[in-house]
């Protein structure tokens, strides 16, 4: 009844918002905050007016009371059957640490509660039951799989089996005066901040008269400081909030150091709030501060350095490219937005950006050409911003104002990857509200379109394109059929030294990880392929083809080569010391696969790997062993056959020819014959991409006769101007519907809404202008020639060939692969760049490249945009950026480290009360770099844990049967535990690796899981 009477005073819904606008932390819903939220979520729809909601609220309150009555019987070691004196709730639970499956079938999905999973000893990877079944016996030995003892986790048998059934209860604190229990979150009591064990609840704390010194920062006097109150529509003066401004005077966002960039963003955000018809003084509740600024670098994968090239910085007219740098340096910054709610600063928005100044580490004196760029790495927010209708507009303004400051500091472009998190996963804030929906890819792309349109309107962004268009120069044609994207050819201007020009290198970008994945998959695929029957090598063509045929048709088919065809399965053969003796394993299948893919620069490099195969076998197996004898036999046979092949190339003495005479022969895929390959090291192949048995066609595109249908494609291909990012008009192109076939008459897939034909016709009919057509123009520029991306009927999945499907059913059949001819005949040296470009093209509308530099030839409208930008940026002083002070604490330097710390200290954002507490703890450490409790401490030796912490799985023992465990089993389990062990199981325990390895009768290994520590002081 009280709730029904006070309904008109509650903040109403605006713009068809969800239940997130309902203030569950107000006094009315305080006793049933969490149950009411989950119950109302299923009752109130988006279109229901608030006046028709009382009947739904009656049902929701009834369900909430039933849940509250059930919780009133709960009693554990934390709550002791008490109710909190602030929120009037009983025992509440935290979210356990996030466990993400690293298997290929789950694609980063969260392991569900109660499920069995398997974890590496260093805590780096987890696998669900389904992915664990499909794992190989020997796990890939990656560098991030080293545990604290230095032993690599290589075997499937070494994975730890655990069950995701951890239960974490909120901590309580008892008032020293009235002996009432209060949640530590409700009391804002942090054990490392308030070192005094005596706690006094708000009812027992004497109220002090408010004066001039009320805890407000010097920058905002008591007359100008405002804060929102839970359930109120307009902010109130901070002095009017009883007891809210004087409880924690030293932990405020205002005390964080300001920079020129954050000050400019805050000014623009407050001006945006004023223009958005928000309640008066709302802008005074918002603060923007940097919480991290540090220098970082990332190592460029060796695969990328081998298969991509950069233009020389000294001589850009050179046809020979420069290898990408060994490591790329950048400045990592984190910008957070706070808003005062109930007198406390709550962190609601966080953005991680990477700024690249082209100060990279090259191996050698020559450097490549790359432009100054910024990368919007991560964005995350929670839904508590007030008023709600200003939330998206404010976040768009944060992004726009940052890009404006980046342009003023000399950066030429901004890169964005629209990648939504998986359900249940988090980017920055741990555990989002249940009422806040995780955006899918289409919604996130639409959000960025609105944000970039705002930047274009302010004159900050001069042009918008896709990463595929700017960095992957392929010959494309306008099509509405997704199957046409498989036929892509790199243009001559995008190839250097037979390899694709390297796209911008950025830490965590999609194309870098995709290149590594495709390369590893290609190596594994070719290594498992079945060779042909014995046959002769071809007399002409690329040397790599002939050497690959020699390996597959003679060496691998030899009877004595059986032990060397595949990697040694040390686990299956029970060779415990194999990887300790053999540090660099190698096999003939891997050598053949690398040769087919053009991995070897010269013949000498291939021979070195073959010698490594046989030398490893002779080292591990003693003389007289059958494998040792076979290794000696195969080594002589390989050298004999290789000498015959080299003699056919006309190298060295015909009577006594040795392979060493042709050790410098190039094994690249773009060398047509051995005589052309025998050139000095500085005389590489031409810049034109020529495949074996293939000659370049007149024009800008090289078409291989081995790929059918590409001869006709070259006549209508589109040539793009990469430097000016210009594109031909859509009217001048040939429109191909379904690859030239008749349109298929049928209904769209169930559950998918197809885009209207009118929109596609508009996209095909004319080229939209960025300054006039707004978001539609951005959509057209991102889609480009692949108009099929606008139609939801086409899922972005690779096409499965007929050989991989069983006729008459939808199940996939295991295809048998026969190598009729080496795949190098169907590849170019730039094959990896082409396949990465194909993957990027399927997702081209998710990779934004925003040009921040003004164009050389500008129209009158573009010149007016420059004036708008100068007016927009007039309050920013770029000269003061060098004098900025940064936060000394290193807590937020790494996003993963911040997320791990939040899980370790249970800093969640699923409710407003927890968001206040989590923001308070984060601010405390950001303001006090030497504060205790930042690094986990071992419960046994009391030393700081630096690498891996062994976390005891906590469980809540209830004296009543409220869970799945029967009371008899629960009682038996409790009786077997000592009081110390029961307390440790309830409150948790953290151990370092040496203490965990010590034997203890009260400690079971199955009760601990290893969790990595990424945070470094």
Image: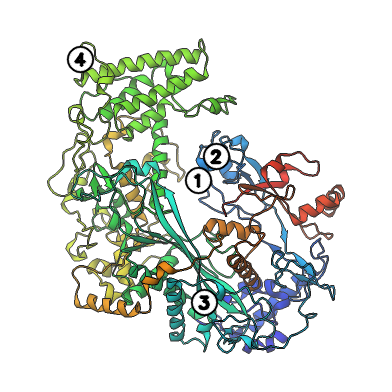
Q: Could you tell me which residue is drawn at 56 percent across and 49 percent down?
A: 101
Which one is earlier in the sequence, the residue at label 2 or at label 3? 2
Which SS class for mark 2?
Answer: loop
* Residue annotated with mark 2: 134
Residue 364's disc number: none
Dot 1, crowdedness within 10 Å: few (<14), some or many (≥20)? few
Q: Confirm or deny contact between disc 2 and disc 1 (CB under 8 A).
A: yes
Whole-number angstrom distance, CA of label 4 to CA of label 3: 79 Å
Helix, strand or loop under label 4: loop
Q: Earlier in the sequence, mark 2 or mark 1?
A: 1
Question: What is the spatial separation of the Cα atoms under label 2 and label 1, in whole angstroms?
Answer: 9 Å
> Splitting the image into 4 quarters, where does residue 695 fall?
top left
List x then y, in percent, for residue 711.
18, 46
Q: CA distance from mark 3 to mark 1?
A: 42 Å
Tell me which numbered mark, 3 or 1, is placed earlier along the sequence. Answer: 1
Where is residue 289 drawn, in percent x and y? 50, 71
Secondary structure at badge 1 equals loop
User: Mark 1 or mark 4, which is nearer the start of the sequence?
Assistant: 1
Up-down relation of residue 52 to residue 985 (above or below): below
Q: Quadrant of residue 571?
A: top right
For the residues labelled 4 and 1, the Cα–Cα distance comes to 52 Å
Residue marked by disc 3? 287
Contact? badges 2 and 4 (CB < 8 Å): no
Residue on which disc 4 sits: 653
Camera-side residue of 166 and 279:
279
Q: Point out the frontmost of discs 2 and 4.
A: 4
Nearer-the-camera pick, 265 or 912: 265
């Amino acid at each position: 009844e009280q709730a029904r009477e006070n309904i008109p005073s509650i903040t109403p819904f605006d713009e068809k918002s969800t239940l997130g606008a309902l203030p569950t932390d107000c006094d009315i819903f305080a006793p049933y905050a969490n149950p009411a939220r989950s119950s109302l979520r299923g009752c109130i729809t988006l279109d229901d007016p608030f006046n028709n909601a009382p009947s739904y609220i009656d049902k929701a309150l009834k369900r909430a009371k039933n849940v509250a009555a059930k919780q009133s019987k709960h009693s554990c070691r934390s709550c002791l059957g008490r109710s909190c004196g602030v929120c009037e709730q009983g025992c509440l639970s935290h979210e356990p640490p996030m466990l993400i499956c690293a298997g290929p079938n789950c694609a980063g999905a969260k392991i569900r509660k109660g499920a069995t999973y398997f974890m590496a000893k260093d805590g780096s990877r987890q696998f669900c039951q389904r992915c664990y079944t499909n794992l190989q016996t020997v796990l890939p030995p990656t560098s991030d799989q080293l545990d604290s003892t230095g032993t690599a986790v290589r075997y499937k048998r070494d994975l730890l089996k655990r069950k995701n059934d951890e239960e974490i209860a909120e901590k309580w604190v008892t008032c020293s005066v009235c002996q009432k229990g209060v949640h530590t979150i409700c009391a804002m009591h942090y054990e490392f901040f308030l070192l005094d064990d005596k706690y006094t609840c708000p009812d027992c704390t004497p109220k002090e008269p408010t004066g001039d010194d009320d805890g407000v920062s010097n920058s905002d006097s008591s007359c100008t400081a405002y804060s929102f109150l839970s359930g109120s529509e307009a902010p109130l003066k901070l002095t009017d909030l009883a007891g809210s401004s004087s409880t924690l005077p030293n932990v405020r966002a205002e005390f964080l150091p300001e920079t020129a960039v954050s000050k400019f963003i805050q000014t623009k955000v407050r001006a945006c709030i004023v223009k958005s018809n928000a309640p008066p003084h709302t802008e005074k509740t918002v603060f923007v501060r940097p919480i991290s600024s540090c220098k970082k670098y990332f190592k460029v994968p060796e695969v990328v350095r081998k298969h991509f090239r950069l233009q020389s910085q000294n001589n850009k007219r050179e046809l020979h490219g420069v290898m990408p740098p060994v490591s790329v340096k950048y400045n990592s910054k984190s910008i957070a937005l706070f808003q005062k709610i109930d007198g406390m600063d709550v962190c609601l928005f966080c953005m991680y950006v990477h700024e690249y100044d082209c100060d990279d580490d090259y191996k050698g004196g020559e450097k490549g050409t790359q432009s100054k760029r910024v990368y919007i790495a991560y964005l995350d927010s929670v839904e508590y911003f007030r008023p709600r209708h200003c939330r998206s507009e404010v976040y768009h303004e944060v992004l726009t104002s940052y890009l404006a400051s980046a342009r003023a500091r000399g950066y030429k472009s901004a890169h964005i990857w629209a990648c939504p998190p998986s359900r249940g996963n988090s980017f920055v804030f741990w555990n989002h509200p249940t009422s806040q929906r995780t955006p899918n890819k289409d919604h996130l792309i639409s959000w960025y379109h609105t944000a970039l349109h705002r930047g274009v309107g302010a004159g900050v962004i001069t042009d918008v394109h896709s990463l595929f268009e700017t960095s992957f120069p392929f010959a494309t044609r306008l099509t509405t059929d997704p199957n046409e994207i498989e036929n892509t050819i790199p243009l001559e201007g995008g190839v250097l030294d037979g390899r694709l020009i390297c796209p911008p290198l950025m830490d965590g970008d999609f194309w870098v990880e995709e290149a590594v994945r495709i390369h590893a998959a290609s190596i594994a695929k070719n290594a498992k392929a079945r060779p042909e029957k014995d046959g002769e090598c071809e007399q002409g063509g690329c040397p790599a083809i002939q050497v690959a045929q020699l390996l597959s048709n003679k060496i691998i088919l030899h009877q004595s080569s059986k032990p060397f065809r595949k990697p040694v399965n040390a686990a299956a053969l029970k060779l415990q010391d194999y990887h300790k003796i053999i540090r660099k394993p190698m096999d003939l299948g891997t050598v053949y696969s690398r040769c087919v893919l053009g991995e070897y620069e010269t013949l000498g490099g291939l021979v070195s790997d073959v010698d490594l195969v046989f030398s490893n076998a002779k080292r591990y197996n003693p003389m007289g062993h059958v494998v040792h004898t076979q290794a000696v036999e195969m080594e002589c046979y390989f050298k004999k056959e290789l000498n015959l092949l080299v003699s056919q190339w006309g190298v060295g003495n015909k009577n006594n020819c040795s392979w060493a005479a042709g050790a410098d022969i190039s094994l690249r895929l773009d060398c047509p014959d051995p005589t052309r390959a025998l050139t000095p090291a500085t005389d590489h192949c031409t810049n034109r991409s020529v495949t074996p048995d293939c000659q370049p066609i007149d024009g800008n595109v090289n078409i291989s006769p081995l790929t059918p249908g590409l001869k006709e494609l070259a006549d209508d291909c589109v040539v793009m101007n990469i430097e000016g990012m210009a594109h031909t008009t859509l009217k001048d192109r040939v429109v191909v519907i379904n690859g030239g076939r008749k349109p298929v008459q049928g209904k769209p897939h169930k559950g998918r809404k197809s885009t209207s034909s009118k929109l596609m016709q508009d996209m095909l009919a004319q080229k939209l202008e960025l300054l006039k057509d707004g978001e539609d123009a951005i959509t057209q520029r991102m889609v480009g020639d692949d108009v099929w991306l606008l139609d939801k009927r086409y899922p972005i999945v690779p096409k499965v060939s007929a050989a991989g499907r069983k006729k008459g059913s939808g199940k996939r059949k295991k295809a048998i692969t026969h190598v009729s001819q080496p795949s190098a005949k169907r590849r170019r040296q730039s094959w990896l760049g082409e396949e990465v470009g194909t993957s990027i093209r399927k997702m081209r509308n998710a990779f934004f490249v925003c040009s921040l530099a003004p164009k050389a030839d500008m129209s009158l409208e573009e010149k007016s945009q420059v004036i708008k930008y100068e007016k927009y940026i007039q309050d920013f002083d770029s000269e003061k950026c060098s004098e900025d002070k940064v936060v000394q604490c290193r807590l937020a330097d790494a996003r993963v480290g911040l997320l791990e710390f939040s899980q370790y200290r249970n800093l969640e954002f699923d409710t407003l009360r927890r968001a206040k507490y989590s923001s308070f703890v984060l601010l405390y450490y950001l303001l006090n770099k030497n504060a205790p409790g930042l690094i986990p401490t071992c419960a046994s030796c009391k030393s700081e844990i630096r690498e891996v912490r062994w976390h005891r799985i906590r469980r809540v023992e209830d004296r009543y049967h409220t869970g799945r465990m029967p009371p008899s089993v629960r009682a038996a389990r409790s009786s077997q535990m000592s009081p110390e062990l029961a307390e440790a199981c309830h409150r948790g325990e953290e151990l370092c690796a040496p203490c965990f390895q010590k034997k203890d009768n009260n400690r079971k290994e199955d009760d601990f899981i290893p969790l990595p520590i990424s945070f470094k002081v």
